[in-house]
Amino acid sequence: MLKIPQSACISLRRHGEETYPHECCGVLLGQFGDDGDGSVTKTVSSVAPCGNTRADSPHNRYNIDPRELIRIQREGRERGEDIVGFYHSHPDHPARWSPTDLAEAHWFGCSYVITSVEKGAAAITNSFELTGTDESDKKFVDEKIAIEA
């Protein structure tokens, strides 16, 4: 399960509207926890919007500069936060992962949040957890989002 404050959810959805018709992208920071039934809950405490460095096809692909990701990770650790996930938008496309999204996902156990942005307005937001043990058996699993006031 992904627990995210309403303000953070609004922020990432607004980011998708601001970058439309290109994909937005960013990092979800927070903590991993055990929800008692053996599954892991990720609790988001902050969102770090990133620039989409994908020059060849920014309307349907995204890339976060590795230097920016390292900086965000370092600053998060200083505040006691881990990278618990990533987000991006799908302009005029459903909030479902694509084969490219899966191929380019490498952070096992993390959430991958996708917001569909239809004609410039954020619509549906879904989350998927990257599961598996390595690249050969990785897959996305639908993940519940709990939006907290």
Image (spheres, rainbow, N blue to C red):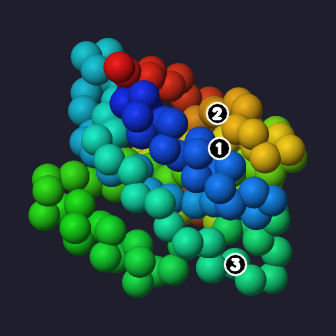
Amino acid, disc 1: Ile
Q: Left of 23 or right of it: where is 33?
A: left
Q: Which residue is mark 3?
A: 54
N-terminal label among 2 and 1: 1
- Quadrant of res 95: top right
Which quarter of the figure is the C terminus placed in?
Answer: top left
Disc 3 and disc 1 in contact, CB within 8 angstroms: no
Whole-percent x, y for residue 68 in the image: 41, 77
Q: Quadrant of the N terminus?
A: top left
- Residue in the image at 32% along x and 68% along y: 72
| Residue plotted at (13% across, 64% down) | 78
**What crowding class fits label 3: few (fewer than 14 Cα within 10 Å), some (14-19), or many (20 or more)?**
some
Q: Are marks 2 and 1 in contact (CB under 8 Å)?
A: yes
Give the residue pinned by disc 2.
Answer: 125
For residue 108, side relative to residue 115 (left or right): left
Amino acid type for the residue under numbered disc 2: Thr
In front of the other: 129 or 89: 89
CA gap, disc 2 to disc 1?
A: 6 Å
Q: Secondary structure at mark 1?
A: strand
> Eyeballing the image, is 3 above or below 139?
above
Q: Earlier in the sequence, mark 3 or mark 2?
A: 3
